[in-house]
Amino acid sequence: MDFAQARRAMVDSQLRPQAVTDPLVVAAMATVPREAFVPASSQSMAYIDRMVPLGNGRSLSPATSLGRLLNELHCRTGERALVVGAGTGYSSAVLAQMGLKVVAVESDPALVEQLRGLPGVTVHAGPLEEGAPSLAPFDIILVDGEIEQLPDALVEQLKPGGRLALGLVENGVSRLQVGTRSVHGFGLKSFADSSMAPLPGFARPAVFTF
């Protein structure tokens, strides 16, 4: 399989039609070999616009979902980024290629080992929902997956003016959302409905009825 050609096709037929236009994002996703971040048996699926299983209940989110989140974050070279739920490191590698200083948080020991040695990426092993408070604050936080609730602990790791993007489940629908921390607080706005790989540790508390 010609992965370079598949990567070009991903940019032209998946990212650009979905309004992913930020030059840094497009150039990075056209460069980073997505096939290197999935199991060898799944490399032929790396550029199909769907989730790719990574094992142990985890998956790589579709490229268009990641591209749209990064497009809305308006990342700038030299900024500090936190990736929550880094998985095998694809989104972290894309951000590093864009010139950001990346901290990747991962809770799965097997995935943590795969992340080690990724150029331009500092690995932080621990619960995803806790982020990396000892390394905060960050200009950018990317929650690289779909979650049910956003913990305040993650928002508090943003600098004033920092941006956060994620897939948030609302009424059974996964919505891509982005928000900026200001002196007045933090709020999210939805800009698209799109599937993302679910992340562990962010379930809403069960509500009991009688």
Image (cartoon, helix red, strand yellow):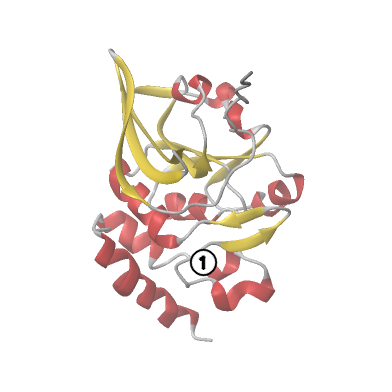
Residue 26 lies, in percent from the top left, at 31, 61
Question: What number of labels is visible?
Answer: 1
Q: Residue at x 43, y 79 (%)?
A: 6
| Residue 188 or residue 96, whichever sits in front | 188
Q: Residue at x 40, y 55 (%)?
A: 65
The x and y percentages for residue 117 are 65, 52
Residue 32 seen in the current view? yes
Residue 34 appears left or right of 165: right
Q: Which residue is mark 1?
A: 34
Res. 75 visible in picture: no
Q: Find residue 162 and report its horizontal and vertical position in percent.
A: 34, 28
Q: Residue at x 23, y 58 (%)?
A: 21
Along the viewing direction, whichever of 103 and 148 lies nearer the viewer: 148
Q: Quadrant of the C terminus?
A: top right
Q: Residue 15's quadrant in the figure?
A: bottom left
Provide the secondary structure element on which disc 1 rests: helix
**Which residue appears farthest toward the front when viewing the image?**
210
Which residue is at 58% across, 33% downward?
Answer: 202
Image quadrant of residue 183? Answer: top left
* Residue 103 on image: x %, y %: 54, 38
Taking the image as shown, residue 24 lies to the left or right of residue 205, namely left
Q: Please identify the quarter of the rendering in which residue 134 is found.
A: top right
The residue lying toward the viewer, choosing from 85 and 33, is 85
Q: Amino acid at mark 1?
A: Arg
The reply, left or right, for residue 160 in relation to residue 6 is: left
In the rendered view, tell whether residue 8 sits above or below residue 166. below
